[in-house]
Image (cartoon, rainbow, N blue to C red):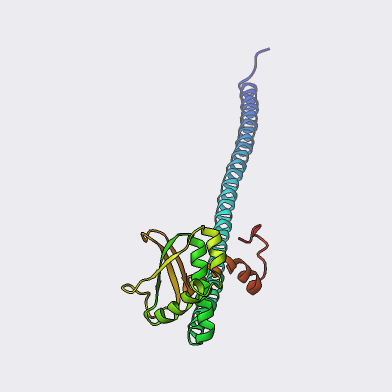
């Protein structure tokens, strides 16, 4: 039985509707897949940027923390240096006060004469030379001469010295070159050719004593340093 034109048109419309339905479903499928892929890519990009931002701020935070540590370390070092300088200044003030007191010793003739004799004899023992030259302040020459007579001619300490050097000692007082008059006192003792010197001025003895006692002075003034294993 042959189809009429109406039947043909009906079948054509039915086929076109089917094709349009499939096309519409395909479009929806493509759109859904595209939307899914877009969301996945967007999520990946967002996560990537989030990680980069977090890394950036973590790096900045570490830099700031490191900068703070450096600043704190610098401040602590500056404070430590100020404390050390203040302590050194205090010790220097004590030494300067001791130097000023040294000048008072020479103003007491009896006390200074006894001290001068000891410094001279100590110089002899340190050199252990048969010939020596004594250099002193010009104002001390007479007192040195008196003390030498006590040492060498009154036999007070000479036997001990002679036993050490196995000979007599020839002593000369330098009458051409004197120690500076502004020093507190004491003597310098030289061997015969002047190449070996024992400095027994009051200042040199104070410096030697200060060098030896500074660790103890620091402990007495500021307490023991817990970070220092040795005190000398």
Position above or below: 146 against 24: below
Position above or below: 72 against 6: below
Q: Residue at x 58, y 59 (%)?
A: 69
Q: Residue at x 44, y 81 (%)?
A: 143
Q: Is residue 76 left or right of residue 201?
A: right
Image mark count? 0
Residue 184 visible from this viewpoint:
no
Q: Residue furthest left?
A: 176
Q: Residue at x 47, y 61 (%)?
A: 127
Q: Is residue 26 left or right of residue 195?
A: right
**Residue 229, percent across and down?**
66, 57
Quadrant occupied by the N terminus: top right
Foreground residue among 145 and 101: 145
Q: Residue at x 48, y 77 (%)?
A: 147
Q: To which quarter of the image does residue 35 belong?
A: top right
Residue 169 visible from this viewpoint:
yes
Foreground residue among 5 and 207: 207
Quadrant occupied by the C terminus: bottom right
Foreground residue among 232 and 129: 129
Q: To which quarter of the image does residue 218 belong?
A: bottom right
**Residue 56, percent across and down?**
55, 50
Foreground residue among 122 and 55: 122
**Residue 179, percent across and down?**
38, 74
**Residue 217, percent across and down?**
61, 71
Position above or below: 68 against 33: below
């Amino acid at each position: 039985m042959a189809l009429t034109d109406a039947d043909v048109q009906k079948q054509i419309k039915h086929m076109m509707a089917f094709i349009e339905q499939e096309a519409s479903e395909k479009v929806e499928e493509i759109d859904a897949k595209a939307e899914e892929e877009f969301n996945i890519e967007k999520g990946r990009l967002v996560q990537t940027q989030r990680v980069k931002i977090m890394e950036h701020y973590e790096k900045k935070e570490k830099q700031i923390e490191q900068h703070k540590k450096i600043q704190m370390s610098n401040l602590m070092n500056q404070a430590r240096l100020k404390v050390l300088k203040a302590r050194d200044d205090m010790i220097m003030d004590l030494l300067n006060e001791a130097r000023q007191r040294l000048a008072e010793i020479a103003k007491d003739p009896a006390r200074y004469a006894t001290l001068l004799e000891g410094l001279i004899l100590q110089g002899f023992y340190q050199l252990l030379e048969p010939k020596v030259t004594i250099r002193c302040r010009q104002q001390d020459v007479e007192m040195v001469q008196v003390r030498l007579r006590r040492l060498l001619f009154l036999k007070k300490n000479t036997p001990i010295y002679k036993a050490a050097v196995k000979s007599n000692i020839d002593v000369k007082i330098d009458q051409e070159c004197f120690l500076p008059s502004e020093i507190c006192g004491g003597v310098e003792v030289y061997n015969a050719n002047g190449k070996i010197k024992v400095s027994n001025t009051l200042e040199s003895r104070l410096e030697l004593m200060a060098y030896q006692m500074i660790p103890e002075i620091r402990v007495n003034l500021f307490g023991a340093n817990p970070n220092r294993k040795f005190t000398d």
